[in-house]
């Protein structure tokens, strides 16, 4: 059963790119994310009670978990949502974030004492090449500077968060850890709203469907699977599956949004799949 988790994660995480645009078309990105993680925190809290997991933790674990939530749910998702909301092409944003496995491989050795083999590096580089082919670089497009900066911040944040979570993954039950991370993400976005933006949400049918998808399938589903995979595997191997996300997102956009999927995209998808296989197999 565990072998199928990465494939479920890829499908759920990739689908988030399809529903991000409807969300930010009907709200500002930070209010939407605060709304999302408020309900995610409640959900994990209720599940902790149901599974009889105590949420009483030490101050050290509390600070560590909140910080992880700020990195992942706050800076990473906030950066991606904000960049797309001000005109950053979704594909370019996804491609930049896809550099995460390269940074994680570079840092997991000295920080986590994980051995990153030449085979894994070859797989990661093939994965990046395939992702670039799928998305295209679109150098001629006008890319907003703030959007580029926000996406780079998101890239750095998800890399640090993955390594940080690997160091903490054995300290707390998964549900309790997810609860406090959701709280951290929610508080981060509330602070952004208080000091920097005017909150806005249009609670129409499109927004409610899209945000429900991201709450239940992405935050409860995909994120929990990701934390489980990080706990069970090395950080460098776990994040290699992220290279399949841009290609899968492109396929979903073709299937559900009638966006073009070229022969070059299909070649890139194949190269990415081979790269992930090489990077993650024992």
Image (spheres, rainbow, N blue to C red):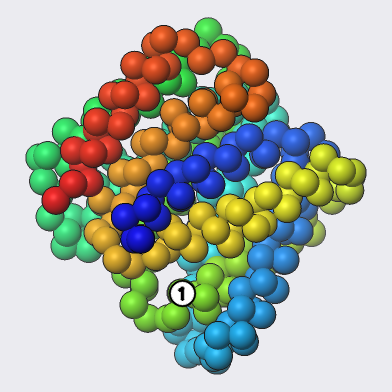
**Crowd band around label 1 with a 10 angstrom C-alpha radius: few (<14), some (14–19), many (20+):** some
At 55% across and 85% down in the image, what residue appears?
Answer: 51
Q: Nearer the viewer, residue 277 or 62?
A: 277
Helix, strand or loop at mark 1: helix
> What is the quadrant of the N terminus in the image?
bottom left
At 58% across and 53% down in the image, what residue appears?
Answer: 218
Count of picture labels: 1
At 50% across and 68% down in the image, what residue appears?
Answer: 67
Q: Is residue 193 left or right of residue 220?
A: right
Provide residue 28's location: percent of width, then percent of height. 78, 43
Residue 18: quarter of image:
top right
Residue 43: quarter of image:
bottom right
52 above or below 23?
Answer: below
Q: Find the residue positioned furthest to the front.
A: 1
108 above or below 246?
Answer: below
Q: Is residue 129 left or right of residue 47?
A: left
Q: Find the residue positioned furthest to the left.
A: 118
At 12% across and 55% down in the image, what residue appears?
Answer: 115
Provide residue 193's location: percent of width, then percent of height. 77, 55
């Amino acid at each position: 059963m565990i072998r199928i988790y990465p494939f479920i994660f890829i499908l759920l995480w990739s689908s988030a790119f399809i529903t991000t645009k409807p969300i930010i078309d009907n709200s500002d990105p930070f209010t939407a994310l605060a709304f999302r993680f408020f309900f995610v925190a409640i959900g994990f809290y209720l599940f902790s009670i149901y599974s009889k997991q105590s949420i009483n933790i030490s101050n050290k674990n509390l600070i560590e978990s909140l910080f992880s939530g700020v990195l992942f749910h706050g800076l990473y998702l906030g950066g991606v949502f904000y960049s797309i909301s001000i005109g950053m092409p979704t594909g370019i944003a996804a491609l930049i974030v896809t550099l995460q496995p390269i940074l994680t491989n570079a840092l997991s050795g000295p920080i986590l004492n994980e051995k990153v083999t030449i085979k894994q590096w070859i797989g990661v580089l093939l994965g990046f090449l395939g992702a670039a082919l799928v998305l295209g670089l679109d150098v001629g497009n006008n890319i907003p500077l703030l959007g580029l900066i926000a996406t780079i911040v998101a890239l750095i944040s998800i890399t640090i968060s993955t390594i940080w979570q690997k160091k903490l993954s054995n300290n707390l039950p998964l549900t309790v850890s997810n609860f406090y991370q959701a709280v951290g993400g929610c508080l981060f976005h509330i602070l952004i709203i208080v000091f920097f933006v005017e909150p806005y949400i249009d609670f129409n049918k499109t927004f409610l469907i899209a945000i429900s998808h991201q709450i239940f399938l992405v935050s409860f589903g995909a994120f929990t699977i990701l934390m489980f995979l990080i706990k069970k595997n090395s950080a460098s191997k776990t994040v290699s599956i992220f290279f399949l996300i841009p290609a899968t997102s492109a396929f979903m956009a073709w299937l559900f949004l009638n966006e073009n999927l070229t022969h070059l995209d299909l070649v890139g998808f194949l190269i990415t799949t081979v790269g992930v296989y090489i990077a993650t197999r024992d």
